[in-house]
Amino acid sequence: MNDFLVGFGYDIHRLCRGEYILLAGIKVKAEKRIIAHSDGDIVFHSLSQAILSALGKEDIGTYFPDYEKKTLNMDSSMIVSLAVKMMSEEGYRVNNVVIDIVLQSPKLKDYKEKIKEKISSVLSVDKKRVAINANTHERVDSVGKEKAIEVYSVVSLVK
């Protein structure tokens, strides 16, 4: 029987005026931008956390503290690269991943396939094993009032 692990990741960031939101390395045209210490790629943050949690590792803040100069404006693909490296070193690979992006606007229908392709490439997994969902908060709370964005990720790993 294969060793099977499941991990969960979550992240939330505030939004302010801007020109785009970065999601899995894809620039999504928007009237907002993500406020963050790093480049703010919330999809990569949540995905990395899901992989690390499946492996029983510490959270991403342990490896990339938001109070250190070296992580200021850092490319978040480095965070995913570390998580994937740790996963591979322990003999695991991704079975499937679900990423749920929660934001009131902009609508992501024109970007979901690009995000899926990027995640598929980063994880070296078939696109059929990657689900990208986009939701709103129906104008409720900070996400619904366009003051924040949330991302939830679930990943299953196999040996």
Image (cartoon, helix red, strand yellow):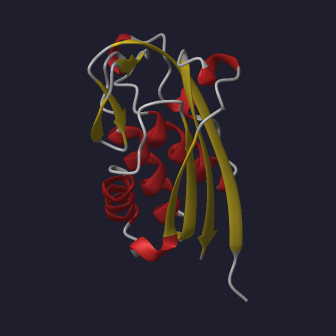
Q: Residue furthest front?
A: 138
> In front here: 147 or 82?
147
Residue at 40 percent of width and 72 percent of height: 127
Residue at 44 percent of width and 56 percent of height: 84
Instruction: Name which quarter of the figure residue 90 lies in.
Output: bottom right
- Residue 39 at what x, y percent from top left? 34, 25
Residue at 70 percent of width and 61 percent of height: 6
Any part of residue 38 in sight: yes
Q: Is residue 154 above or below residue 137?
A: below
Query: How many numbered marks have been drawn onto this rendered protein structure?
Result: 0
Q: Residue furthest bottom?
A: 1
Q: Is residue 15 above or below residue 78?
A: above
Q: Is residue 78 above or below residue 72?
A: below
- Residue 75 at what x, y percent from top left? 30, 32
Any part of residue 57 in sight: no
- Residue 145 at what x, y percent from top left? 59, 17
Q: Image check: 50 left or right of 69?
A: right
Picture quarter with the C terminus: bottom right
> In front here: 145 or 22?
145
Residue at 56 percent of width and 69 percent of height: 96
Picture quarter with the N terminus: bottom right
Instruction: Name which quarter of the figure residue 58 lies in.
Output: top right
- Residue 32 at what x, y percent from top left? 37, 18
Q: Image check: 2 left or right of 42?
A: right
